[in-house]
Image: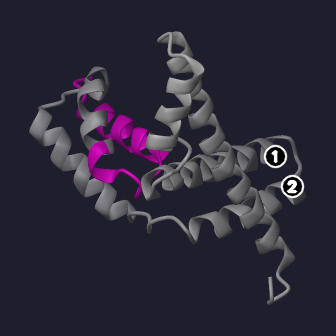
Amino acid sequence: MKSGDTFRRDTLRFLLAGIQREGVDRLQGTIERLVAEGKDEASRQSYIAEHHPSDLDDIAVLEVLQKQAKMRRDSTEAFRKGDRPELAAKEERELGVIQSYLPTQMSDAELRAIVERVVAETGAAGPRDMGKVMPKVLAQTKDRADGKTVAGLVGAMLKEKSPS
């Protein structure tokens, strides 16, 4: 705020609102679950006071940031298709701010090496084996690679291995 960077300030405020919204959603989900279980008001309040379901840990905050980054990527793509380059540029700038708070993304070479290793380990032979490969690759690349990028690379590699 002191630097006068209003764009960054506004983006961070939007992220904070998303994090707070996630906390409220978790609290509401917990209340609904307790009501469904037939808990009375006093036991619901004591459970909430004891467990703090609206408090988010670092992993939950990271998930919110990743959702926001994905929304920006999707919006950028949509704006480009709709011939709105000024809005696409704004979304890309916001994505840049969000990415500065996310773990560093894997390089294409690192990602390709993981996919090749998992394909070899699972013995995947074609596109129909994507269900075997994807969960293992995503487990190894969690937070460090976009799921859409991973799926595209796995699909391309499995297509190459496919007997034509």
Q: How is the image coloured?
A: one colour
What secondary structure is marked by label 1?
A: helix
77 or 4, which lies in front?
A: 4
Q: Quadrant of residue 28?
A: top right
How packed is label 1: few (under 14 Cα within 10 Å), some, or many (20 or more)? some
Instruction: Give, as a single range, the part of the protein colored magenta.
Output: 139-164
User: In this rendering, is residue 149 above or below 10?
Assistant: above
Which quadrant of the rendered structure holds the C terminus? top left
Q: Residue at x 56, y 15 (%)?
A: 35
- How packed mark 2 is, by other alpha carbons closer than 10 Å (few <14, some 14-19, many 20 or more), is some
Q: Secondary structure at mark 2?
A: helix
Taking depth in this image into account, of 120 and 22 the one nearest to the observer is 22
Asked whether the beta carbons under mark 2 and mark 1 sit within 8 Å of each other, the answer is yes
Residue depicted at x 67% and y 45%:
71
Q: Is residue 155 above or below residue 1?
A: above
Whether residue 151 is in magenta: the answer is: yes
Q: Position of residue 26 (x, y in %)?
A: 56, 36
Residue 104's quadrant in the figure?
bottom left
Q: Is residue 49 magenta?
A: no
For the point 50% across and 34% down, the residue is 46
Left or right: 160 in relation to 68: left
Mark 1 = which residue?
79
Chief secondary structure of the magenta span? helix
The image's mark for residue 87 is 2
